[in-house]
Image: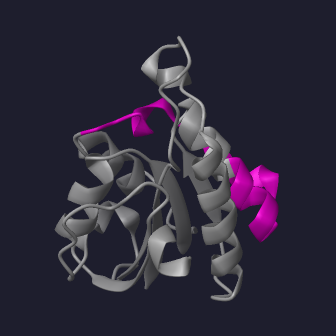
Amino acid sequence: MKKLIIVRHAKSSWEHNVSDHERPLNKRGFNDADLVSKYLINLKLKYDKLISSDAMRAKTTANIFIENLKITKSICFLDHNLYDFSGEKLIQVVRECPDSVNNLIIFGHNHAITSFVNLYGDVYVDNIPTCGVTILELNIEQWDNLKPGKTFRTIFPKHLK
């Protein structure tokens, strides 16, 4: 059994004259990432590997989770392939995860996140909001055998406020 925690990056700012890849979080984004990551503490999840998109807004969201959840930095990685909006590269990143990893947390972007959750979970979600988290339980032993599983939980910032 594998557990996949999928996180859409927190709300970003459009106020800066930077490329899409370099857009930072806005104030709400920082607050939501702090709120959601602190909520996850109560679930007592284990994290074997963390992979984040290398886009600024995803990296920053991941760093807030790393700090609040006390995730060991040696298991945290950036992957440009997660700067993906269709979901194809997201699937590839998950399938390439070592089988020794049982609990994987990924930080990425929409529409890839919503598409992935609807493809591999058993609960339809119209849209994963910024800083939304979906936890999937997958009845597989090898990530390369990725197939639909169970949507264990969805956590959206608005439900925690």
Residue shown at the point (40%, 47%) measured from the top left = 93
Q: Nearer the viewer, residue 121 or 97?
A: 121
Corner quadrant of residue 152: bottom left
| Residue 38 is covered by the magenta coloring | no
| Residue 75 is covered by the magenta coloring | yes
Q: Is residue 63 above or below residue 160?
A: above
Figure label count? 0
Residue shown at the point (53%, 13%) measured from the top left = 18
Q: Left or right: 76 with respect to 145?
A: right
Residue farthest to the top, as pictured: 17
Position of the C terminus, as image quadrant, is bottom right
Residue 31, percent from left and from top: 66, 57
Residue 55, percent from left and from top: 53, 31
Q: Nearer the viewer, residue 33 or 42?
A: 33
Residue 26 seen? yes
Q: Left or right: 43 with respect to 82?
A: right
Residue 4 seen? no
Corner quadrant of residue 16: top right
Corner quadrant of residue 67: bottom right
Instruction: Give the magenta-colored segment's residue range.
Output: 63-85
Q: Nearer the viewer, residue 115 or 22?
A: 22
Residue shown at the point (44%, 21%) measured from the top left = 20
Q: Is residue 116 above or below residue 61?
A: below
Position of the N terminus, as image quadrant, is bottom left
Residue 118, percent from left and from top: 20, 67
Residue 94, percent from left and from top: 40, 55
